[in-house]
Image (cartoon, rainbow, N blue to C red):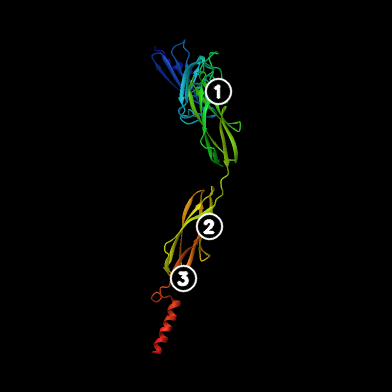
Amino acid sequence: MPRDRTAGIRSAGTSRTWGIVLVVVLTGTLTAIAVGGGVATALQNDGPDSAPNYSDTYIGTVEIDGEPAPVGTTVTAEIDGERRGSITVEEAGEFGSMDDRLSVSGTANETGTPVTFLVDGEEATADPSVTFGSGGVVSLTVGEGSTPTSGTGSTADPDPDPDAPGPDVEVVAGELSVDTVRIGEQVDVTATVENAGGNGTVPVELLVDGAVDTERKVTLEDGATENVTFERPFNETGTVDIAVGDLELGTVTVRDRAPAAFEVATVRASAAELEAGETVDVTATVRNVGETSETDTVRLVTDGSVAAERNVTLDGNESETVSFTESFESPGEHEIAVGESDARTVTVTDEDAVSGFGVATAIPALIGASVLIRRR
C-alpha cells in the first residue's frame, strides 16, 4: 500500500502563526513558503542534515553626514562578512518600501547572528542593532554622529601603516572677488591649496576677523592642488579681515546702501506752440540715484501749480519714463515743469484771432478803422 506522504506534511504545516502554508513535493525536495502576520520567511530543506534557508526583510531610513542619503545610494547587508542582500535608495533618506524590501538571506543556524549594513560600502550604525531573524524597520547612519558597530563589512584599511605620511596641505594663493560691498552683498573668496604630504582629507578654513567662519573638507593626493571657493555675505557695516588658513587675503569694507533719491533727468513737450484747447504731451525720465527701492510722487507743474501726479516705484539706480497730457484754454505763454526740473515754455494762440492779431489787438484795430471811415 503506498505511503500517504501528505499526512505528515499537513500536520507539520498547520501552525496558526503563519496562517497559510503552500506545500509542493518534488523529487524528495520539500519547499514551504509561509506568509502571515510577521515578516515573510521562506524555508527549504534539502535533506535531514541541511539547515533551512530563510529570507529576512528590512526597510528604514538612511543618512550620510547628517543628511538624507541621495537617490542611487546602495544599502548592503552582510552576515559574517558575506554579502546577503542589497537595495538601491529610490527616495532620498529611505531604503525599501512595503512592496520592495531589502531581503537578507541566511540559514536557521544563523538566527541571532548580527547583521552588518553598509551604505555605499561604508559600515553604518544601525538603530536598533539587528540580528538575523528579527526583520523590521531600522535607521542607518554614516558619518557625523555614527559609531559603526564591529563587523567585517567596513572598507577602511584594517591595518593602516603607522609610518605612512599624513597630508600636509598649505594655502598657496587666494583672492577676493571685491574689496567693497554694500549690506546684503557677498564676497567670493577663492583659495588654492596644495598637498605636500601623503594622501588624505583635511579641512580648509575661511577666517573672518581671525575666527573660523566656514570650513570645506578637501581630499588630495600627494602633490595635488585644488581651488576652494567660499561665498560670504555681509549684513553689517564695517571692515573685516579675510584669510584662508594661514594666508591673509585682505580687508573687505561693508557700507550701508545709499537712501533712495529721485531725480528728473530729461523733460520733453510734444509741441512748443498750440491753439487754445489743444493738448500737449509731456514726458519725463525719472531716475532713482540711491541704492534702495522706494516709491515717490512725480508731479507735473504748470504755471507754478500742480496739474497732475504719478506714483513711481524704482529700485536703486533704476529709471523710468513718466507721461502727462495737459491743455491750456487761455492764449499766451505758459510754463511747464516736472518736479524740480527747469521749466519749458509753451505758447498758446487763440484760433479766433484776426489775421495774426489776437483779441487784444484786433478789437482796437477794428474800432480805429470804423472811426476813420466815418470821417471820410
What percent of the width, then of the height, locates residue 265? Answer: 48, 55
Nearer the viewer's eye, disc 2 or disc 1?
2
CA–CA distance between discs 1 and 3? 92 Å
Tell me if residue 13 comes above or below residue 302 in the rendering. Answer: above
Mark with earlier residue (2, 1):
1
What percent of the width, then of the height, locates residue 161? Answer: 53, 13
Quarter of the image where one finds residue 162: top right
Quarter of the image where one finds residue 27: top left
Q: Secondary structure at mark 2?
A: strand
Quadrant occupied by the N terminus? top left
User: Are the residues at dot 3 and dot 2 in contact (C-beta closer than 8 Å)?
Assistant: no
Q: Which residue is mark 2?
A: 297
Amino acid type shown at disc 2: Thr
Quadrant occupied by the C terminus? bottom left
User: Are the residues at dot 2 and dot 1 in contact (C-beta closer than 8 Å)?
Assistant: no
What percent of the width, then of the height, locates residue 155? Answer: 50, 18
CA–CA distance between discs 3 and 2? 29 Å
Q: Nearer the viewer, residue 215 or 207?
A: 207
Q: Residues within 10 Å of mark 2 (few under 14, many from 20)?
A: few
What percent of the width, then of the height, locates residue 329? Answer: 46, 71
Q: Which residue is mark 3?
A: 332
> Would residue 11 be seen by someone viewing this image from the given angle?
no
Tell me if residue 346 comes above or below residue 106 in the rendering. Answer: below
Mark with earlier residue (1, 3):
1
Amino acid type shown at disc 1: Thr
Q: Which residue is mark 1?
A: 125
Amino acid type shown at disc 3: Gly
Q: Which residue occupies the extreme top position in the image?
A: 49
